[in-house]
């Protein structure tokens, strides 16, 4: 079993839809959590950190459920430009530079 | 743009050869991490350098080695290349508190 698991998708949604991704992790001692966005053949870009209290950035909301060991990403009012692969990353400490990544969930937003 | 640069952008090598990849950190960042991303997979942590010392290593063999220089730029060296080393190699730099990391555009390595 992988340390960090994501549903690969693809998720195909119409513009304006709300879509949610989950990411489960196996190490209960994990300390920091992130969502990245990766466009085809490009580098991952940090989308948001995930805090215990949950956090929101515009149309994006991230939540952490420590008891069930998963993080989630909710995208509201999907845009065509949201089409990408979304990677979750989990860290054993607060050092973001030693991340264990999932294999990503692919989202395609269609007109 | 993150300000993290990598060179070269693409590279083709043959099995058994050696390769050196380079990364320049974003200004103000003193931590560099290297990741390997195979097609269809998430990045895998190779190692991190902090203040010119290795600061943690993932599950990669010793033929993967690195350096960090006083200006915080970094190199990844891979000896005795294998076909499975074909991947996108990403470096990411981070600030002193290391609470975030920002990726460079990557080097795409093909081993034939």
Image (cartoon, coloured by chain):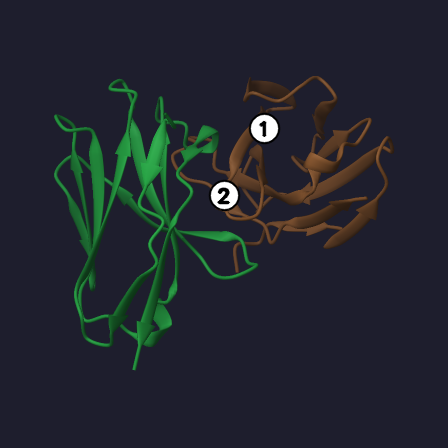
Chain colours: A green, B brown
Please give the residue where the numbered disc 1 appears in the rendered image.
B46
Corner quadrant of residue B28? top right
Disc 2 residue crowd, few under 14, some 14–19, many 20+, Cα 10 Å:
some
Q: Give whichever of B78, A52 is nearer the camera.
A: B78
Quadrant in which the C terminus of chain A is drawn: bottom left
Residue at image point 33% right, 75% down: A80
- Are discs 2 and 1 located on one and the same chain? yes
Relative image position of residue A28 (x, y in whole percent): 24, 19
Residue at image point 26% right, 34% down: A24
Left/right of residue A107 with respect to residue B110 in the rendered view = left
Question: Helix, strand or loop at disc 1?
Answer: strand
**Mark positioned earlier in the residue sequence (2 or 1):** 2
> From what the image shows, is residue A97 above or below residue A11?
above
Relative image position of residue A93 (x, y in whole percent): 35, 22
Left/right of residue B86 with respect to residue A9 in the rendered view = right
Labels in figure, total:
2
Q: Give whichever of B5, B27 is nearer the camera.
A: B5
Residue at image point 36% right, 25% down: A1
Q: Give whichever of B103, A85 is nearer the camera.
A: A85
Question: Helix, strand or loop at disc 2?
Answer: loop
**Which chain's residue wears label 1?**
B
Relative image position of residue A109 (x, y in whole percent): 31, 71
Corner quadrant of residue B50? top right
Q: Which mark is residue B41?
A: 2
Mark 2 vs mark 1, foreground winner is 2
């Amino acid at each position: 079993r992988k340390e960090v698991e994501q549903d690969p998708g693809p998720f195909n949604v119409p513009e304006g839809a709300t879509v949610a991704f989950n990411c489960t992790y196996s190490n209960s001692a994990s300390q920091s959590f992130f969502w990245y966005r990766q466009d085809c053949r490009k580098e991952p870009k940090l989308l948001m950190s995930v805090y215990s209290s949950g956090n929101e950035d515009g149309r994006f909301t991230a939540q952490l459920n420590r008891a069930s060991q998963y993080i989630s990403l909710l995208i509201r009012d999907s845009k065509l430009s949201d089409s990408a692969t979304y990677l979750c990353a989990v860290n054993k400490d607060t050092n973001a530079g030693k991340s264990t990544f999932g294999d990503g969930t692919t989202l395609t937003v269609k007109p | 743009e993150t300000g993290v640069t990598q060179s070269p952008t693409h590279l083709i090598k043959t099995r058994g050869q050696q390769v050196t990849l380079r990364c320049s950190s974003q200004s103000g960042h003193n931590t560099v991490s290297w990741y390997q991303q195979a097609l269809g997979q998430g990045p895998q942590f190779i190692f991190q350098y902090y203040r010119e010392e290795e600061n943690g290593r993932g599950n990669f063999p010793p033929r993967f080695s690195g350096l960090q220089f006083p200006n915080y730029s970094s190199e990844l060296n891979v000896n005795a290349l294998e076909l499975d080393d074909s991947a996108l190699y990403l470096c990411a730099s981070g600030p002193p508190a290391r609470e975030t990391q920002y990726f460079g555009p990557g080097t795409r390595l093909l081993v034939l």
